Image (cartoon, rainbow, N blue to C red):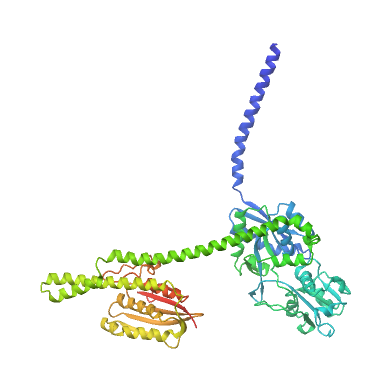
Amino acid sequence: MWEESAIKNKIAFLTVRFVLTVFILSLLFIPLANCESNESQVYRIGVLTVCGNEECLKERWTPVVAYLSDCIPNSSFEMVPLEYDEFSQTLTNDNIDFFYSNPILYVEMARVNGAGRIATFQPLWNNFSYAGMGGVIFARADRNDINSLQDLKGKSFMAVSDRSLGGYLAARGEFHLEDIEDDDFSSITFADYQRDVVLSVIEGNVDSGTVRTAVLENMIREGIIGRSDVKILSTKEYDAYPFLISTELYPDWVFAKTASTGDEISKSITIALLSMPADSEAAISLGASGWTVPADYSPVDRLMRELRYGMYVDYGKITLREAFIQHWYILGFVLMIFAIFVVHSCWMLEKKKKLQLEASNQLKDLFMDIMRHDLINPVNVIKGFSDVLYADEVNLEKKESLKTISKQSEHLTSMISSAAKLARLESDEDMEFRIQDIGAILGMVADSFSPEFSKKGINLEYNIVQEYQSKVNDVIEDVFSNIISNSLKYSPAGSTVSISVQDEGKFWKIMVADEGDGIADNAKPYIFDRFKRADKKGIKGTGLGLAIVKRIVEIHKGSVGVEDNPKGKGSVFWVMLEKA
């Protein structure tokens, strides 16, 4: 009995010692784990190899990997070359975070594995960037029997690979539109390199062929072939696209993330790629101007479906009943989206009406607020009686009081007039616009202020040398009148006010520069708001003049602003109006 008790005590002792040992060891390793979490995270980028040249690929991508590591703190990157046949399996099973591939593989990875595009490759040609890729279908120039795609029936045809988008599949898409099937050719063969296809056609080994866009131009530039050696079939043209092309224009290669990659690092890589300078080593090594926002790859997806290629090899091979059974939820989803669209459209229409009503009410409230805030009795009655009393009064102190009442009445009248004008400008539906000479309008306004400028001893420079045609409403005169009037108010005697018009591409830039005290930087963002004025002591104003200016310019789809006078003192008010 005593031995059994001793054994139990020993077991209990060993158990307690084991638990304490595990606990102490866990305390020791917790700091190590925390320390390791601060180390640089390594991300792997799978890059599709072309023609199996891994050394060349590593040489091109080493600057890119270094660039990303420099741009993203606590992160480093490793480039992993991937052959076409192993690409999908490796991305799925081998801890790849990002990948760079042709559009075909990307569409498959996006559809099957949930990959997401980050940026699209932006290549260079003659120091200019361009977008897109496709295929060019051609025959030897002296083949008088081949002038269209239909003429290729019964002829031999060559491409670089049955998996290449620009080198074959894009051309197949055009053949599909022309109802030309593979069996319509006498033979279809594939070469190791795109240039071999070109040379085989020129040498007469095959009747016709297709290569990716830019291949012919590069061979012509290197003097390998002449432009007159080949005949392009089914030529197409796209704006700003520099190469011969026979097919639809498809998006270029893509940098993408796998489904398991986090959003934060993906966002950081997106920013880094889109910010890559064109003259950086990373961009130059890729032969690119950098990267652009991810393109729309749905045309590639559509082409794969039409050709029953890749994951779409069995696409459409089901009966209508089977399709309904398998995809009834899609029909339900479409109906739901349609219902949401209808409800949303009705809601937006109602919201628009509500906003218009609110805007109208706000204008009414603005006017009523001014009325309640500044008027006790009809302003005209006050003005009239104060003027009559002023004329008959002999007491100097009373006359000064009456003069103050009269001036305040005038100020109140000005405020009401400005508020009413601003209210009318909130709706431009009834305004008519016609082509007028901005210079002539400026001249007329400037001439009307000439006596006042002379009286104050201010030099007025009017630098108008030509006609400046713009489609405007007559109310534009108020803009120039207000700005010139402000320059007159805030300019000291002996200074100069300069009026000029500058050509800014699609716009005329009208500028009024003064040599006054200028406007503080913290006041500039607000001076075009209602009842906002710079601190100008002793100078009267309602605080609505520049708000009216801004609204009139907005109606003309222009812009208005203010900046410091580059001559060192004063301000330059400018207005941008579209050319006619």
Left or right of 111? Residue 190 is right
Left or right of 559? Residue 64 is right
The percent position of residue 191, horizontal first and vertical second, equals 83, 70
The residue nearer to you, when weighing 357 against 386, is 357
Residue 64's place in the image compared with 246, above or below, is: above
The residue shown at (64%, 28%) is 19
Residue 531 seen from this side: no
The percent position of residue 538, horizontal first and vertical second, equals 26, 70
Residue 413 seen from this side: yes
Left or right of 436? Residue 263 is right
Residue 104's place in the image compared with 27, above or below, is: below
The percent position of residue 471, horizontal first and vertical second, equals 47, 82
Q: Name the quarter where the N terminus is drawn.
A: top right
The residue nearer to you, when weighing 473 against 25, is 473
The percent position of residue 428, horizontal first and vertical second, equals 45, 75
| Snapshot quadrant of residue 230 | bottom right
Identity of the residue furthest to the top in this view: 1
Left or right of 415? Residue 427 is right
